[in-house]
Amino acid sequence: MPFLIDGYNLLRSVQKQLEHPRFAEAELCMVLREYLRRSRHRGTIIFDGIGPRQKDRLHGTGGLQIVFSGHGVEADAVMERLIFENTAPKRLTVVSSDRRIRAAAKHRRCPDVKADDFWQQVCEFVEKPTPAREPQEKRQGIGLAEADGWMEVFGLAKKPARTSK
């Protein structure tokens, strides 16, 4: 399920919750990338304006597209346009506490989540330990040599056929 995230709306919410006013766009995007990677989702985060001068920490993949609305264009207007242009709005989750954005989401029947609630969901998910991967042998089976070894351990090894004279 793709996410459409109101960048500064979420960032201000996170800064309040963490009581850390210096938590910036780059840190937020790093956490969101990890969340999207682990949850196997993708998302777009929209920020107002042209963004910080140093954008090198904002680049990267990880399922998160970072968009700055541009000079003189509100992120809200960009988000509304993306909501209305979306071809599968019921599968698009809109993250914002802004009434205007949430109204646009409701109009298109997009699921919407308030910024505070989304951040809590992200933190809980990212803090969970990743489950151990299943060994390949579970799906593919063991090799013949290993099977023979276990057959011998359990006394089920084939005995050489007797030849009669």
Image (cartoon, rainbow, N blue to C red):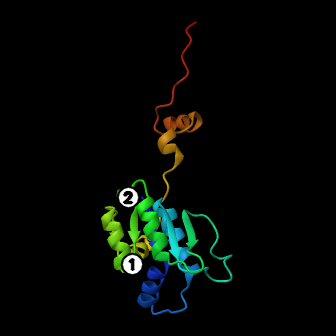
The answer to which image quadrant residue 97 occupies is bottom left
Looking at the image, tell me whether mark 2 or mark 1 is earlier in sequence order. 2
Residue at position x 53%, y 87% in the image: 23
Q: Is residue 6 visible?
A: no
Residue at position x 51%, y 73% in the image: 46
Horizontal and vertical percent for residue 83?
42, 64
Horizontal and vertical percent for residue 62?
57, 64
SS at mark 2 in the image: helix
Residue 139 in the image: above or below residue 164: below
Residue 101 in the image: above or below residue 11: above
Horizontal and vertical percent for residue 75?
49, 76
Residue 93 in the image: above or below residue 9: above
Q: For this rendering, which residue is in front, 20 or 106? A: 106
For label 1, the residue is 115
Horizontal and vertical percent for residue 54?
68, 81
Q: Is residue 43 visible?
A: yes
Q: Residue furthest front?
A: 72
For label 2, the residue is 89
Q: Nearer the viewer, mark 2 or mark 1?
A: 2
Q: For this rendering, which residue is in front, 110 or 35? A: 110
